[in-house]
Amino acid sequence: MRRLLSYAAALLLLCPLLPCQSMADAATAPTIVMAKDFMFAPVATTVKAGSTVTWTNKDDEPHTVVSGTGLFRSAALDTDESFSFRFDKPGTYHYACSIHPRMTGTIVVQ
């Protein structure tokens, strides 16, 4: 028990020296969506307003990310290429791959 308390005390002393992420930074930290196996994963993602979502293609085939309303549209993404979009307004945003229309997803912004 004494050893555990010593470790806890050492951690408390070191904590101010460690890099910390503020709550505001955590709310706007990038969210990653993968295009893999001809689907987006996760299919549905919830983020806070002001957050950036990054889609990364992990397939050997090109994919796009196109919103249903035309708000955002990526070029064709080859393997390991990415596209990012910042969501400033709350709402529900549906998107698909224009090359493979069965690949769909949703971003919910709170």
Image: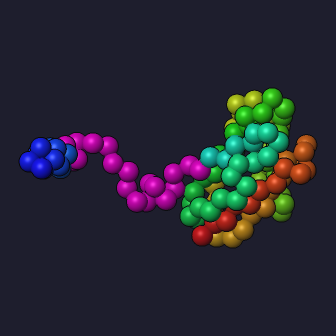
Q: Which residue lies furthest to the left in this view?
A: 2
Does residue 58 appear left or right of residue 24 in this picture?
Answer: right
Above or below 40: residue 110: below
Residue 12 makes an appearance in the image: yes
Residue 9 makes an appearance in the image: no
Q: Residue at 67% x, 65% y: name it.
A: 108
Is 59 colored magenta in this rendering?
no
Does residue 104 appear left or right of residue 45 in this picture?
Answer: right
Residue 78 sits in which quadrant? top right
Q: Tell me where residue 91 appears, x and y as whole percent.
A: 69, 70
Q: How is the image coloured?
A: rainbow
Q: Which quadrant, please, contains the C terminus?
A: bottom right
Q: Tell me where residue 82 appears, x and y as whole percent.
A: 69, 38
Q: Residue at 44% x, 54% y: name it.
A: 25
User: Magenta stretch?
Assistant: 14-31
Q: Residue furthest front?
A: 1
Does residue 55 appear left or right of residue 104 in this picture?
Answer: left
Q: Residue at 59% x, 50% y: name it.
A: 31
Is 18 colored magenta in this rendering?
yes
Q: Tell me where residue 60 appears, x and y as whole percent.
A: 81, 29
Q: Residue at 73% x, 55% y: name it.
A: 43
Does residue 47 appear left or right of residue 58 in this picture?
Answer: left
Above or below 95: residue 14: above
